[in-house]
Image: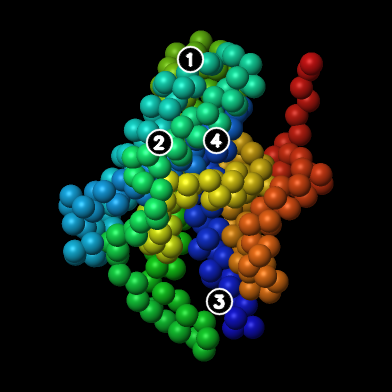
Amino acid sequence: MEDFFQHVLNGLNLGAIYALIALGYTMVYGVLQFINFAHAEVYMLGAFSIYYANKWLHLSDHPGWMAFGISIAIAIVVCSAVGLLIERLAYRPLRGSPRLNILITAIGVSLFLQFSGQAVFGADPKLFPQVLMDSEIVRFGQIQIRSFDLTILGVSMAAMALLHFLIHHTKMGRAIQAVRHSQTSASLMGINVNFMISLVFVLGSSLAGVGAVLVGLKYPKIDPLMGMLIGLKAFVAAVVGGIGSLPGAVVGGLLMGLSEEMVVAYLSSTYRDALAFGLLILILVLRPSGLFGKSQVEKV
């Protein structure tokens, strides 16, 4: 039983990270109705931004909350800028084009960033700088709660709570919801649609940056292809929760993390990555709209 609770804690940590990245997918889909497959590479660039920032600022020489906060801030700024550039240069010119064109472009941007990362950063894995020290906080028998566990959960939940507040309790959030409902109606109401869509990319990319730092703390190995697998799992989490639903992305991420941890603990680590595809097939067969999604009728 103690092992079970330890696995639950580990699964919640992993699921919180999946949820942060899944929110970026679901926010863009909710407004523009397409999947930003380059979102996983934004997460990768966030991790590398801290790696190179450490070379200049020497954050790992004095690990602590200040170094951690600076790392979070740098990752947010870099990822937000990259997300904004992707939206402005790759997606905005195609707005109004067939969705297949945008889908192909999204995949192309993803591949471009992956292989550009290999050319610029090198294909060999690198060690994420230790900007925060890990320590044991409390132990109950075999259950061990460490500072990284509480940091990942605390920062993730704080970021999600802040996003919820921005979307549901501010004028900016109401404007984003109006654009999501109808871009034409929103523009007639005086809302700058282009600005709001760019803001959605900035918010989603910021969460990816936070997730990159948290993953770097827990699993300190980064490489240019690191976003591919975690991006796929976060996308599956968004689909499981109901693509376009913010609560669904959070629940889907937590379910993905818990399921993956239980598979590793009680079955075999061999099936860890296959779980994502299995869940995707299962949810598409049983409930295509996801747990929190709503079925829609589309005229053709």
Q: Earlier in the sequence, mark 2 or mark 3?
A: 3
The answer to whether the residue labelled 2 contacts the one labelled 1, judged by CB atoms less than 8 Å apart, is no
Q: Nearer the observer, disc 2 or disc 1? A: 2
Q: On the picture, is 217 further left or further right than 142?
A: left
x and y percent of residue 193 in the render? 47, 18
Residue 54, given in percent of the width and then of the height, sits at: 23, 53
183 lies above or below 153: above
Q: Where is mark 4, residue-wise? A: 37
Q: Residue 93 has which mark?
A: 1
Pointer 1 and pointer 3: residues touching (CB < 8 Å)? no
Label 4: how many Cα within 10 Å (few below 14, some 14–19, many 20+): many
Q: Distance between the residues labelled 1 and 4?
A: 17 Å
The disc placed on residue 67 is none
Q: Is residue 234 visible?
A: no
Label number found at residue 116: 2
Residue drawn at (45%, 76%), measured in percent from left and top?
145
Please, what is the three-letter code of the amino acid marked with disc 3?
Answer: Gln
Q: Is residue 281 left or right of residue 146?
A: right
* Mark found first going from the N terminus, 1 or 4: 4
**Amino acid residing under circle 1:** Pro
Which element type, helix, strand or loop, lies under badge 3? helix
- In this rendering, the label closer to the viewer, 2 or 4: 2
Distance Cα–Cα, label 1 vs label 3:
48 Å
Q: Classify 297 as above or below 98.
A: below
Q: Which of 189 and 223 is in front in this view?
A: 223
Q: How crowded is mark 2: few (under 14 residues within 10 Å), some or many (20 or more)?
A: few
